[in-house]
Image (cartoon, grey):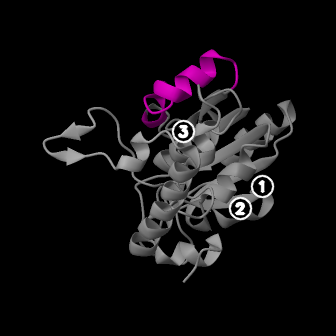
Amino acid sequence: MRFDIITVLPELLESPLNHSIMQRAKDKGLLEVHLHQLRDYATGKHRQVDDYQFGGGAGMVMKPEPISACISKLCAERTYDEIIYTTPDGQMLDQALCNRLSMKQNVLILCGHYKGVDDRIRQKYVTLEVSIGDYVLSGGELAAAVIVDSVGRLIPGVLNDETSALFDSFQDNLLAPPVYTRPADWNGMKVPEVLLSGHEKNIEEWRHEQSIERTKTRRPDLLEKSGDGY
């Protein structure tokens, strides 16, 4: 799978995507991430990528010309399954969307910045607008890193244990159950006996019950989607 990311601050993405699971995915040849500096496509002495917004108001707007030049060049080289724009008013990123995106081959991400991009870019090129939460970031770079990480880990072969992702929170619209490791008794706090029993059916049932209870307590809104609602 290949991600191309258009940004004015590529250095913000270098560290998150060059370590741990994402780096191993790239080392295995399962994931490619290419960063494109938007200023390279701007004209003029200062390579300006923003300008004042029509109608007045605070905040600069990303100019359409350099974005169009960059997208056009990339689209001439390959076909993109999705062209994503990171924006607070986009579709909320959830596990179902991550699962869907993990089936794609080529994804282009345009990182929003300043007050946002000229809306004509959204109309002409963008196929999917994504938000990672109901809050505002300084730019779309961190959101792009979240998208790549949450989607990239789902690519077959990326995780050492490929079944691990199947039991993540939100895969079945339930939060994951509590987990434990050694020692079985830590400062008088003991691991639930069922997890030490070796009885797979009982363990599976306990985990499912714990998932429901944790979701009911912390994210009751998810129970409407899970089929385990009360």
Q: Earlier in the sequence, mark 3 or mark 2?
A: 3
**To which residue does mark 3 refer?**
47
Which is more N-terminal, label 1 or label 3?
A: 3
Labelled disc at residue 229: none
Q: Residue at x 24, y 46 (%)?
A: 190
* Residue type, label 2: Arg
Name the residue tied to disc 2: 122
Amino acid type of disc 3? Answer: Arg
Q: Residues within 10 Å of mark 1 (few under 14, many from 20)?
A: some
Dot 1: what SS? loop
- The quadrant of the image that shows the C terminus is bottom right
The answer to whether marks 2 and 1 mark residues whose Cβ atoms lie closer than 8 Å is yes
- 3D distance between C-alphas at marks 2 and 1: 6 Å
The residue beneath circle 1 is 125
Q: Residues within 10 Å of mark 3 (few under 14, many from 20)?
A: few
The amino acid beneath tag 1 is Tyr
Distance of mark 3 from mark 2, alpha carbons? Answer: 22 Å
**Label 2 Cα neighbours within 10 Å, binned few <14 / some 14-19 / many ≥20:** some
Instruction: Report the residue at 55% width, 46% height from top.
Output: 144
Q: Which residues are magenta?
A: 12-30
**Percent position (x, y) of residue 41?**
65, 36
Answer with left or right where residue 155 lies relative to residue 20. Answer: right
Can residue 21 be found in the magenta stretch?
yes
Q: Is residue 68 above or below residue 46?
A: below
The percent coordinates of residue 63 (x first, y second) are: 61, 54
Q: Secondary structure at mark 2?
A: helix
Of circles 3 and 1, the one toward us is 1
Residue found farthest to the bottom: 230
Q: Residue furthest left?
A: 187
Residue at 45% from the left image edge and 72% from the top image edge:
219
